[in-house]
């Protein structure tokens, strides 16, 4: 029992480290690109080629042959039925809307140190669009493959799915804290986001829906949400205006709608598995 738990812990830490390492490759390429030839976003096609190779290898392509089946199973990137895929993406987009609102609510209620980010306004528009798009794809593909594919899949073989989702979200949290700061409400926000993405992968039995939602979410945050953080004004509940309370109501409504759709999707997925192929 202890050896099995230790093996799982080592595997999860390795996957987490590998996920960070791949994202570090993109960060290094981007820094080199912006410091040398900012008008030519050469880091984007280079990273696209690296992503293609990593995705194929993680999915079981190429040798060694003895690990191909394990890699294909661990990635969990099969195509779910169209109805399940569509509902999962819809639930994820509703949840994403709720998360965007929750982020702005947090920054309006408490003073949060703003994480340092590159000033993309200083670079050509083509470079900005290419870089933001690739950053969104890197974050979505790498995190979903590593964290909701390999890591969550391993945990699901040891504990029930919902508990595996919570454990995975907790394992990931130090990584968020290292880049965003160890601020309680912000870490809670990332925990909720990770739980949502994990639930999408669980009910769809595929990371494809969560990749779509994650990539769209990152693009929205890179382009619109995070750049506005520094200009947000902290308010008190007593002085909150109608727009603040509308955001709170919309957050609650979108959260409830997303949760209801995920619960329905979970029931449909379980029924489909019981029916068999």
Image (tube, rainbow, N blue to C red):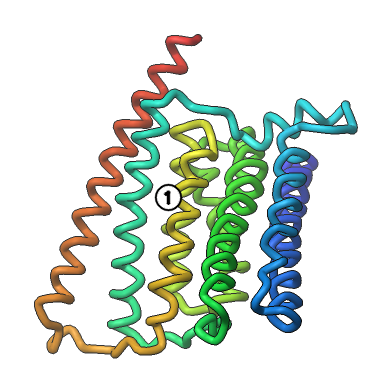
**Residue 59 as seen in the image, left or right of residue 268:** right
Q: Position of residue 182 (x, y in %)?
A: 53, 78
Residue nearest the viewer, comparing 231 with 37: 37
196 relative to 275, above or below: below
38 relative to 57, above or below: below
Q: What residue lies at 29% left-to-right and 89% top-to-bottom? A: 234
49 relative to 27, above or below: above
Q: Which residue is tagged 1?
A: 196
Residue nearest the viewer, comparing 140 with 268: 140
Q: Position of residue 64 (x, y in %)?
A: 90, 32
Q: What residue lies at 61% left-to-right and 68% top-to-bottom? A: 174
Residue nearest the viewer, comparing 96 with 203: 96
Quadrant of the frame with the N terminus: top right
Q: What residue lies at 48% left-to-right and 45% top-to-bottom? A: 210
SS of the residue under disc 1: helix
Residue nearest the viewer, comparing 22 with 195: 22
Q: Residues within 10 Å of mark 1 (few under 14, many from 20)?
A: many
Residue 252 occupies quadrant: bottom left
Q: Position of residue 157 (x, y in %)?
A: 63, 33
């Amino acid at each position: 029992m202890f050896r099995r738990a230790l093996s799982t812990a080592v595997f999860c830490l390795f996957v987490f480290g590998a996920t960070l390492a791949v994202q570090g490759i993109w960060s290094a390429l981007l820094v080199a690109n912006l410091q040398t030839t900012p008008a030519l976003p050469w880091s984007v096609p280079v990273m696209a080629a690296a992503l293609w190779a990593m995705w194929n290898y993680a999915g079981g392509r190429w040798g060694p042959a003895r690990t191909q089946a394990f890699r294909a199973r661990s990635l969990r990137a099969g195509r779910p039925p169209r109805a399940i895929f569509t509902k999962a993406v819809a639930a994820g987009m509703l949840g994403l809307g709720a998360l965007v609102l929750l982020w702005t609510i947090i920054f309006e209620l408490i003073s949060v140190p703003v994480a340092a980010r590159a000033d993309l306004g200083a670079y050509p528009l083509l470079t900005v669009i290419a870089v933001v798009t690739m950053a969104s794809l890197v974050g979505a593909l790498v995190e979903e493959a590593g964290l909701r594919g390999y890591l969550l899949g391993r945990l699901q073989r040891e504990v029930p799915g919902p508990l595996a989702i919570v454990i995975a979200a907790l394992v990931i949290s130090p990584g968020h804290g290292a880049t965003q700061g160890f601020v309680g409400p912000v870490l809670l926000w990332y925990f909720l986001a990770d739980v949502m993405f994990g639930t999408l992968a669980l009910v769809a039995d595929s990371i494809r829906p969560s990749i779509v939602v994650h990539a769209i979410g990152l693009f929205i945050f890179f382009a619109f949400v995070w750049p506005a953080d520094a200009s947000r004004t902290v308010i008190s509940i007593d002085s909150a205006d109608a727009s603040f309370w509308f955001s709170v109501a919309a957050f609650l409504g979108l959260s409830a709608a997303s949760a209801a759709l995920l619960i329905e999707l979970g029931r449909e997925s379980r029924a489909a598995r019981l029916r068999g192929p």
